[in-house]
Image: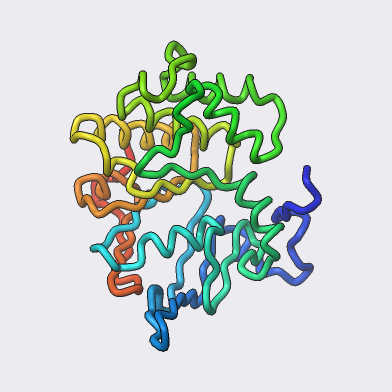
């Protein structure tokens, strides 16, 4: 293991709060402000949130509510202006950029609306590239296993332009899965898909959650998709305004 990648077991201070260790994610008073000239624009305002391992959570809200800013902070792509972010009991918001990058590469899987696949290489090679960036071994085996999980074993040699939109998103999900991350962050993963294909992708996330116990945080503005999650957190004007669990069980298949 890279000595620069902190883990809960190695990096917890002796007096770490036991309740904190039980949470995969804990946000305490997270605030984010952007400066536009002489004006400060608040994006997140005193956000407090805990997320347990194995949850399937949807973050919902209108445009400008702070959803993407929150995801960027959770994914260590951005830093809060104030507050603390604990991942697996480790306060990561104050780590150096190098340590954050190592942690992000190893422990967090990303799925984006635009797939972010390299066009000139195969599905298998796209998944392998994610493992190269993470510095992980057994890349071919990991990549093939991940593509099998998302049902694309027979399409592994195809390039993105030979795949449908839904298949491309499955490759992106396989790329995230191959690292065996602690957390998968999916930012509007159905935004570029038709309704039928979007339903298939959400069902895949449900399957990964139920059958494999993966922790998934899905950002969406689509209420029908959000209701498929186990837990729904509502954002408005940079603040959490609701935190609900669907009465019918959400993420059940």
Q: In this view, does 226 lie to the left or right of 181?
A: left
Residue 19 visible in the displayed image = no
Q: Which residue appears at 31% of the width and 67% of the height?
A: 235
For residue 97, what is the image quadrant?
Answer: bottom right
- Please identify the residue farthest to the top as the structure is shown: 154
Q: Which residue appears at 38% of the width and 60% of the height?
A: 68
Quick one: 194 or 163, which is closer to the camera? 163
Pinpoint residue 252: horizontal percent, then vertical percent.
32, 37
Q: How many numbered marks have been drawn onto this rendered protein structure?
A: 0
For residue 201, what is the image quadrant?
Answer: top left
Quarter that holds the N terminus: top right
Q: Which residue appears at 25% of the width and 63% of the height?
A: 63
Quarter that holds the C terminus: top left
The image's colouring method is rainbow
Residue 237 visible in the displayed image = yes
Q: Is residue 213 left or right of residue 20?
A: left
Pinpoint residue 148: horizontal percent, then vertical percent.
48, 19
Pinpoint residue 126: horizontal percent, then vertical percent.
52, 28
Q: Which residue appears at 29% of the width and 74% of the height?
A: 237
Q: In this view, does 70 lie above or below 175?
A: below
Quick one: 222 or 64, which is closer to the camera? 64
Q: Is residue 15 left or right of residue 94?
A: right
Quick one: 213 or 71, which is closer to the camera? 71
Quick one: 36 or 109, which is closer to the camera? 36
Q: Is residue 219 above or below residue 120?
A: below
């Amino acid at each position: 293991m890279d000595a620069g990648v902190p883990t809960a077991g190695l990096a917890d201070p002796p007096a770490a709060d036991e309740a904190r260790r039980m949470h995969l994610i804990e946000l305490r008073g997270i605030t984010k402000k952007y400066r536009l000239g002489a004006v400060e624009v608040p994006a997140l305002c005193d956000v407090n949130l805990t997320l347990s391992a194995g949850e399937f959570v949807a973050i919902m809200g209108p445009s400008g509510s702070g959803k993407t800013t929150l995801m960027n902070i959770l994914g260590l792509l951005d830093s809060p202006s104030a507050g603390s972010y604990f991942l697996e009991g480790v306060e990561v918001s104050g780590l150096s950029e190098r340590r954050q990058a190592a942690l992000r590469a190893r422990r967090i899987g990303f799925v984006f609306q635009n797939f972010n696949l390299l066009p000139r290489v195969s599905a298998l090679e796209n998944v392998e590239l994610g493992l190269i960036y993470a510095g992980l071994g057994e890349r071919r085996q990991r990549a093939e296993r991940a593509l099998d999980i998302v049902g694309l074993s027979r399409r592994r040699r195809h390039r993105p332009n030979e795949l449908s939109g839904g298949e491309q998103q499955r490759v992106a999900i396989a790329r995230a899965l191959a690292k065996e991350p602690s957390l998968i962050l999916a930012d509007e993963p159905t935004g570029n898909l038709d309704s039928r294909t979007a339903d298939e992708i959400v069902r895949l996330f449900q399957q990964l959650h139920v059958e494999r116990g993966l922790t998934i945080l899905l950002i969406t503005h689509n209420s029908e998709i959000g209701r498929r999650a186990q837990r729904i957190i509502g954002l408005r004007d940079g603040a959490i305004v609701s935190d609900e669990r669907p009465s019918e069980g959400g993420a059940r298949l």
